Image (tube, rainbow, N blue to C red):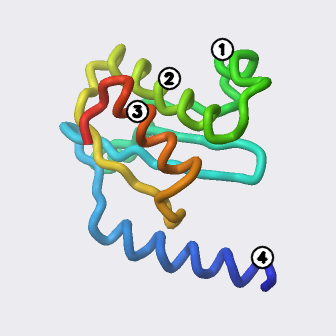
Amino acid sequence: MSSKRLDIGRQRRKVRVRKKVRGTDQRPRVCVFRSNKHIYAQVISDAQGKTLAAVSTLSEGLAAQIKDNNATDAAKQVGVALAKVCKEKNITSVVFDRNGFIYHGRVKAVADGAREGGLDF
């Protein structure tokens, strides 16, 4: 299969998920993007249309820390770091948007890390 065909499938799943998942000021949305090398997570308030927090494997403090880890462990550390940033901004409850990606592997690791860090979803 070509990569274009796979991207169409993810886009269809993304639309299906986003019909139901909305981020409010009380419960912002945690959106995850997974590339081949890195993973990105951001907390978005759809009511304001703003990104409240963002963490990735490229973030300054995190990149050096996860250099030798495998991808799943790095994703879990991204989730923990995201929870830490959210706690600093008094965000405790969120909704999870898997962004069309299947909920296993690195996407699940981000969610588990965020739960470990204290986010409620």
Considering only order in the chain, which callout, 4 or 3, is on the residue closer to the N terminus? 4
- Residues at circles 2 and 1 in contact by the CB criterion of under 8 Å: yes
Task: Check if mark 3's residue and mark 1's residue have beta carbons within 8 Å.
Answer: no
**Quarter holding the C terminus?**
top left
Residue receiving disc 2: 81
Between 11 and 77, the residue placed more toward the observer is 77
- Please tell me which of labels 2 and 1 falls first in the chain: 1
Discs 3, 4 touching: Cβ within 8 Å: no
Of the two numbered discs 2 and 3 on the same chain, state the one appearing first in sequence: 2
Kindly identify the amino acid type of the residue bearing the numbered disc 1: Gly
Label 4 sits on residue:
3
In the rendered structure, which amino acid carries the disc numbered 3?
Answer: Ala
Q: Mark 3 points at which residue?
A: 114
Q: Contact, CB < 8 Å: mark 2 with mark 3?
A: no
Residue at 63% x, 52% y: name it.
34
Q: Which residue corresponds to the image point at 58% horizontal and 80% vertical from the top-left? A: 9
Which image quarter is the N terminus in? bottom right
Mark 2–mark 1 distance (CA, rounded to whole Å): 10 Å
- Identify the element where label 1 is drawn: helix
List the residue tagged with mark 1: 61
